[in-house]
Amino acid sequence: MKNVFVKKPNEKGMISMIMMLFVSAVVLTISVSVASLAMGEMKMAKNGVASVEKTFYIAESGLNIALYRLFSDPSPGSYTIDVDGVEVAVEVLLNPGESYQRIVRVKATTPDNKVRRVQAIVDTDSFGVALDYAVQGGDGGITMENNSVIEGDVYSNGNIVAENNSYIQGEVWAAENHMLEGADVSENVHVYEIIDSLIGGDAYYNIIDTDTEVTGALHPGASELDTEDFPITDEDIENWKSEIVDEVGANSSECPESYNTGYHCIMSDTVLETTKIVGTSSEPIGLYLDGDSQLILGGNLWVTGD
C-alpha cells in the first residue's frame, strides 16, 4: 500500500482560491444580468416593431377611407376618423399646380405616441381652386343693385358701384385708381376713392367725399393696389364651355321694361343646370335676376352678355 500525502494549503493559497471563486460568482451574476437585459430588449424590440407595424396599418387604412370619401365629397377640409381605436387626422387640400387634383394627408398617432404620416395626390373630375375672395371682379368692375348682398371679401380691378341699399359683409379692395360708390361695407375698405358709402371698419383711400361715413379710423394717402389675376385659368374656362349642352336665349316678354331687349330674365325661383345664355359675338345675351327671386346653379353658367 502506497502512502498518500495531502499537502495542506497555506494561507495564501486559500485566499487565492476564495478570490477565484468570488470572481467566478461575479462573472456568473453579470452574465445572467446581461442575458436578462438582452431578453428584455428583444421583447421591447418585438413590441416596438409590432407597434410601428400597427401604426403603419392604421395610417394606410385611414388613407384608404379618406380616398373612398373623395368619391362623394372632393371638397378640401379636415376631419378625424377612428381606425381600430386610434384617432386618425385627415387633411384634404387643393393642389396649387393642378385644379383637378387633391392632396390627401393622413396622420395616425397611437396611444404610445408612435406617429405615421402618409400622403397621396389624387386625380378627380371635380374642379377646385383656392379662392381668396367671395367675389372677384375684372376690369369691368362690380355693380350691385336691388338690395343685393355679398357675404365675404371683395376684390375688383375696376369700380365697385352699389345701389338700392346693397351690402358687402366683408373687406373690400379696388385696384389702381378705382372707386367704391354707394356701398354699405361691414369691414375695412382699400380703394383710391370713396363716394357716398358707409364703412364699418377702417378706410384706406386717397379721395373721400363728405357723404361717406366711416366707423373706424381714416388712412388717407394709401398706396394704389395692383390688379389681380383670376385664380381660374383661361384653359379651365374653355374646358367648362366645351362641356355645356343646355342653352337658353332671350325671353323679352318676361323681362322688366328696361331689360326687354337682349336679356334672359329670371323672375321667379329657378334652377339652371350647366347652361349657356345664348348670344352671338355681335349681339350677346345678358342675364337679369329679379331681386325677389332665387337662382340655384346646378352646374357652370356661361353668360355671353352682361
Image: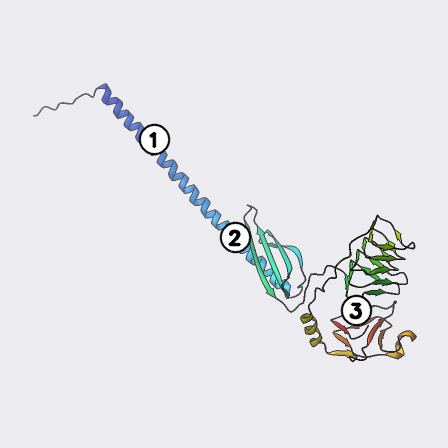
Instruction: Classify residue 4 by image quadrant.
Output: top left
Judged from the image, the secondary structure of the residue bearing numbered disc 1 is helix
Residue located 64% across and 64% down the image = 70
Check disc 1: other Cα within 10 Å, few if <14, some if 14-19, many if 20+: few
What mark, if any, has residue 111 been given in the picture?
none
Rendering colour mode: rainbow
Distance from Cα at disc 1 to Cα at disc 2: 42 Å
Judged from the image, the secondary structure of the residue bearing numbered disc 3 is strand
The amino acid beneath tag 2 is Lys
Q: Earlier in the sequence, mark 2 or mark 3?
A: 2
Q: Is residue 6 above or below residue 276?
A: above
Residue at the top extreme, as displayed? 11
Distance from Cα at disc 3 to Cα at disc 1: 87 Å
Quarter that holds the C terminus? bottom right
Q: Position of residue 142 (x, y in %)?
A: 82, 65
Check disc 2: other Cα within 10 Å, few if <14, some if 14-19, many if 20+: some
Q: Position of residue 79 (x, y in %)?
A: 66, 55
Label 2 sits on residue: 54
Q: Earlier in the sequence, mark 1 or mark 2?
A: 1
Q: Position of residue 35 (x, y in %)?
A: 38, 39
| Labels 2, 3: front one | 3
Label 3 sits on residue: 296
Label 1 sits on residue: 26
Check disc 3: other Cα within 10 Å, few if <14, some if 14-19, many if 20+: few
Q: Is residue 256 visible?
A: no
